[in-house]
Amino acid sequence: MEIAVESGVRPMEMGVGMGKNQTLICAPIMADTVDQMVELMHKAKFKGADIVEVRLDHLKSLDPRPDIEVLIRQCPLPTLFTYRPTWEGGEYNGDEDSRFEALQLAMELGADHIDIELKAAHDFMNFTSGNKPEKCKIIVSSHNYEYTPSVEDLGNLVARIQGAGADIVKFATTALDITDVARVFQITIHSQVPIIAMVMGERGLMSRILCPKFGGYLTFGTLEEGKVSAPGQPTIDELISLYNFRSIDADTKVFGIIGKPVSHSKSPKLYNRAFKEDGVNGVFVHLLVDDVNKFFDTYSSPDFSGFSCTIPHKEVALARCDEVDPVAKSIGAVNCLIRRPDGKLFGCNTDYVGAISSIEIGLQGSQNGATHTGSPLAGKLFVVIGAGGAGKALAYGAKEKGARVVIANRSYDRARDLAELVGGQALTLAELNSFHPETGMILANTTSIGMQPKIEETPISKEALRNYELVFDAIYTPKITRLLREAQEVGSKIVTGVEMFIGQAYEQYERFTGLPARKQLFRDIMADY
Ligand code: NAP
Ligand code: DHK
């Protein structure tokens, strides 16, 4: 089923105002001792969390009354108490009555919320005879660590949770594909009661960031990278500082970088900061996409407004576009897609401008790049390693500037095809090290060889680099790759992938927002990188 996820009017929820982002950031508190938990609670408040989830099941020992009294009395934030059993992904493997007793005590001692699993809710309500302080909200939760059910099954799950006496509905599923998140958005936006709905795993990240747009009651943000209570949780810092979480509301337009892998991308850092500076109501997220067509078929709403595209989707993404910029068509790859108000997809390629202009500037040693006498690339022998999206962009751009182009690639057939397209020569990667028909050549690496985490790899020997006047690497994680380091060591000029990244982002930002890209701002944002 294709789901066009529409942001719509959301029901009033426990004071959550229509169109206002009052989705809470909840910090999971997990520690061995009560004292350590109290310390983490203060850290959570300092980092900007709105509420803490006290995971009693992580304590090495628990004396319920004194310990819960301390935890509630010393907590600087509203509390949610959870005592998760092992059969639902937690650490508690004791008897249920003791678990229920501790949760009931937490309610009596002043907890603002408690979480009880749907499977135990009936027994818990019987145990407490349905009694609870008015202040305390009962979250009834269900966790699926295997997959994300259909919209119909999720709807039935929500109904069962409501029927179990929940004040707040909570479910967490697992994303096998990023399109699973659309079904959870669908349920969230139409929920008539307060709801917490997450999709676990990297492919579910969007659910944790965009929940204010669709009416979620809270999202989880960790105190430190990786210190998660469920797969895929971002940190509080990432939510607030990287994704501008507090500014996300029902009208926020969604942008993102599609790729696989994609977590390394600095595009969210760049565009979200620029959105904030320019007052643009947009958010740019990491989108781990397996199937480009399935992704665009599912997120077909104009609310999903614009996308950058990276490995390995640039060529497939071009084929998915309803309209393609002629240059991108010549290159055969797009790295920028815009969803038009009529729902059609427009694709273009900003890689080649970003890279070629950076290389011209690197050759000229000034911010002018091409001069009145034309490009410094004219007549140069320009060797491109790679024949993918970036490789095609560089080859096309170099040819346009009058360079003689050589393509070296792992798959020789792709090298040959691209070389024919630009009237150049094709090499195998193995031939690269012995290819030095002249000095003063330009080298551009557009493979992922040397990209994190394999930073000790390089596509060409250090000795062979002596024949190159300038070496460019499209990779920008790390900024200085082994290739660039060794090029510098043999005396070549170098241009980093960060320069290309900034250059290719200007046009994308203008297409995303209709605003001119403030180039110095972009450089400032990336300066600390
Ligand atoms: P792509 O379309 O998937 O192309 C990848 C290229 O790398 C192909 O030529 C592929 O060769 C080659 N390759 C991949 N793994 C290899 C290996 N282990 N050994 C030898 N060759 C290998 O990706 P892309 O979009 O062009 O991006 C390529 C790189 O450029 C990525 O690191 C990306 O991050 C970077 N990039 C950076 C920017 C920027 O703004 N700085 C912009 C664009 C791209 P085959 O043809 O044999 O598969
Ligand atoms: C990298 C590329 O390949 C560019 O073409 C995209 C993306 C940006 C990134 O965010 O890493 O436009």
Image (cartoon, rainbow, N blue to C red):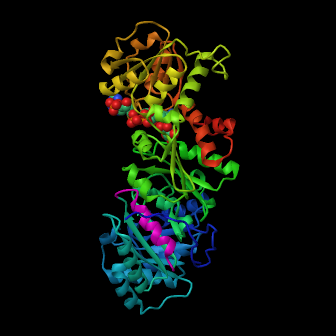
Q: Is residue 175 visible?
A: yes
Could you tell me which quadrant the C terminus lies in? top right
- Residue 178 is one of the magenta-drawn residues: yes
The part of the image, by quadrant, that contains residue 482 is top left
Q: Is residue 501 above or below residue 164?
A: above
Which residue ends up furthest to the top in the rendered image? 438
- Residue 407 is one of the magenta-drawn residues: no
Which region is colored magenta?
A: 176-192
The picture places residue 26, in percent across and down from the top left corner, at 53, 66
Q: Is residue 237 above or below residue 518?
A: below
Q: Residue at x 48, y 15 (%)?
A: 489
Q: Horizontal placement of 200 versus 242: left or right?
A: left
Q: Is residue 141 above or below residue 244?
A: below
Q: Toward the viewer: 86 or 69?
A: 86
The picture places residue 183, in percent across and down from the top left corner, at 42, 66
Q: Toward the viewer: 299 or 102?
A: 299
The part of the image, by quadrant, that contains residue 85 is bottom left
The picture places residue 246, in percent across and down from the top left corner, at 62, 61
Q: Is residue 25 visible?
A: no
The picture places residue 370, in percent across and down from the top left corner, at 63, 19
